[in-house]
Image: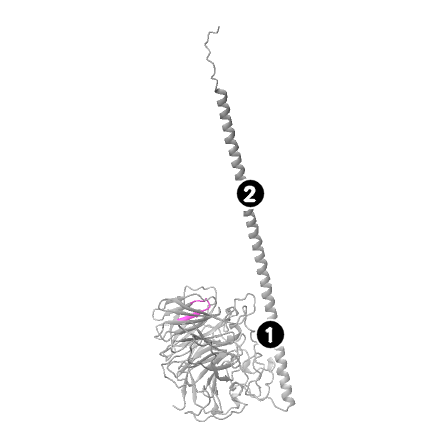
Amino acid sequence: MSMYPHRGLPQNAAPRLNELLDQIRSEFDAQVRLNEGYEQQSKYTIAPMNAFRHGTLLTSHVVQQQVQEAQLVREKVYQLEQQHMTIKQKYEEELVHLRRQLDQARGGAPQQGMPGPPQHGPPPPSIGASNNLFSSVMTGGSQTGLPPQPPPQEQQAPPGPPHQMQPPPSLQGPPPPPPPPSQQPPFAQPYQQGPAPNGFPGQPPQSTASPGPGAKRAIGRPTGPATPQINTPMPYPGPGASPQVQNHPTPDHRGPMPPHPGPAVNNALGDLDPDRLPAHVKKTRDDWFVIFNQQVPRMLDVDLVHTLDHSSVVCCVRFSHDGKYVATGCNRSAQIYDVNTGEKVCVLQDENADVSGDLYIRSVCFSPDGKYLATGAEDKLIRVWDIQNRTIRNTFSGHEQDIYSLDFSRDGRIIASGSGDRTVRLWDIETGGSLMTLSIEDGVTTVAISPDTKYVAAGSLDKSVRVWDIHAGYLLERLEGPDGHKDSVYSVAFSPNGRDLVSGSLDKTIKMWELSAPRNPANAPVKGGKCVKTFEGHRDFVLSVALTPDNNWVLSGSKDRGVQFWDPRTGFTQLMLQGHKNSVISVAPSPVGGYFATGSGDMRARIWSYRSLNA
């Protein structure tokens, strides 16, 4: 018998233990299944992520390949353009040679004349998305020379630029070929400018080139000097300031016009040799001269008032509406001069602008009250300056390429701008916002607002001029067609009465358009105005046009370095002024009459006076 008492185990202990073990086993199995689910879900998540990462890398590689292919295509297109230009130049030179042989075979003698502007190689091709337009067109690349002076009598006039395949309409036969470089007349020889006051070289550096309208900046391409803008100076006098332009020549206070001028002269005053002209049809000074058209009564006289030297190409000139001041645009600054004294009274320069390169001011425009000056530049910005305080009142951004032209409305509220991004934009100076964007198919080179602020016109690289309703945005007229320009339009200007419009083009002509009226976009399709006059006589691209406030004269500035006064009633030129050493990029008459200004690639702006000899 045991000395210790024993208590027996409960009878239900074993089943309870088994139950607990089963419960633990169930929880373990559930946890295993849960982990397996997480692992499976991770596989489904990681696989798409890896696939996405792989696809991204593949897409990046494909995009890089496409960019490289596009660059190769661009380079190939440029090479083809260069080859085309070379072949075209050779073809046109051969045509000139054959015309001369034909003229000699007919027994005709080459016409003596004043040498024209030096030849600079072929003109730019049809402008696409990668061409540098203004570099070669405006300043003429190597188009430099001695001050315009009468050449030796024995020299013959070289033909016009290769861009023109037909001889001037005023010539009986084909022009003679250009003399060899060693025999070029003094007017066509390169000249050397002295150093500018700020250290800039005499001729604008090659780095100043920039794309033209509709063109993107090209890398590694040969470019010309700085490329100024064709400003569209358009003075707007009060209503009824001038008579309506007639469609056909009619006798007026200027005296009877000859029925048909002889073809040897006509409007081609650049073909004449000043040394062979009688004194009463020319006016010669130290560094400028004027040739008057012998076949029309002499109605005007021109004199130099002031020479305004700059340190870079003068891209644009514009008078204030009271005629007391003239503004110029050049590299990095706009400058304002007193018309009476010629003194510089104001320099407007944005000190916050990028200083790493050139920044040409391509367009300037005074507000009607003279308090503000709007400037358009290569940095795609429009700045409206408070002149008195030398501060920026408004900055308008939105253009995607260089701004080439500006104009203020007569009420002072709207600014129109034209850009290489193929748009015309309207801005509200009071609110500081954009009113409207008008898009076209090609780069916009020039804009003008009508005197009554109802319409805005724009010239384009596509050879046409468009007119819109400035408030509704309707396209009202498109001026083109068989009688239209054959090359890019670089300048437009409304007549003071608003019924007509003039345009200047790379086809070397100026055209006067009679605008359709009434203009009713709701009930009629887009109209085409009637071309009532074509002014021919310039030897090279027409870069700027304007009308005098009395509506009596059309002014034009050209790459041939000349300024011409045209009679809008007859289409005849009154005179040709040679007063610059390089292209005349901008011309602007004073809104009060009596003066006009010119801006040139020779780093000068000049103020001139003109007066009627009948007054």
Q: Quadrant of residue 569?
A: bottom left
Report if residue 260 lies within the magenta region. Answer: no
In this view, the mark in front (2 or 1): 2
The label shown at residue 43 is 2
Counting other residues with Cα less than 10 Å from the Cα at mark 2, is it few (<14), some (14-19), or many (20 or more)? Answer: few
Confirm whether residue 581 shows in the render. no
Residue 524 visible in the displayed image: yes
- Judging depth in this view, the residue of 331 and 42 nearest the camera is 42
Q: In the image, what residue type sits under mark 1?
A: Met
Q: Residue at x 45, y 91 (%)?
A: 250
| Residue 85 disc label | 1
What span is in magenta?
Answer: 374-381
How did the renderer colour the structure?
one colour
Give, as a three-letter code, the residue at label 2: Lys
Name the element at disc 2. Answer: helix
- Location of residue 439 with respect to 276 vertically, above or below: above
* Tags 2 and 1 touching, CB below 8 Å: no
First reached walking from the N terminus: tag 2 or tag 1:
2
**161 in relation to 253, above or below:** above
Q: CA distance from mark 2 to mark 1?
A: 63 Å
Instruction: Point out residue 124 in the picture as x, y percentages from the top left corner.
Output: 55, 74
Where does residue 52 sit, x and y in percent of width and height? Answer: 55, 50
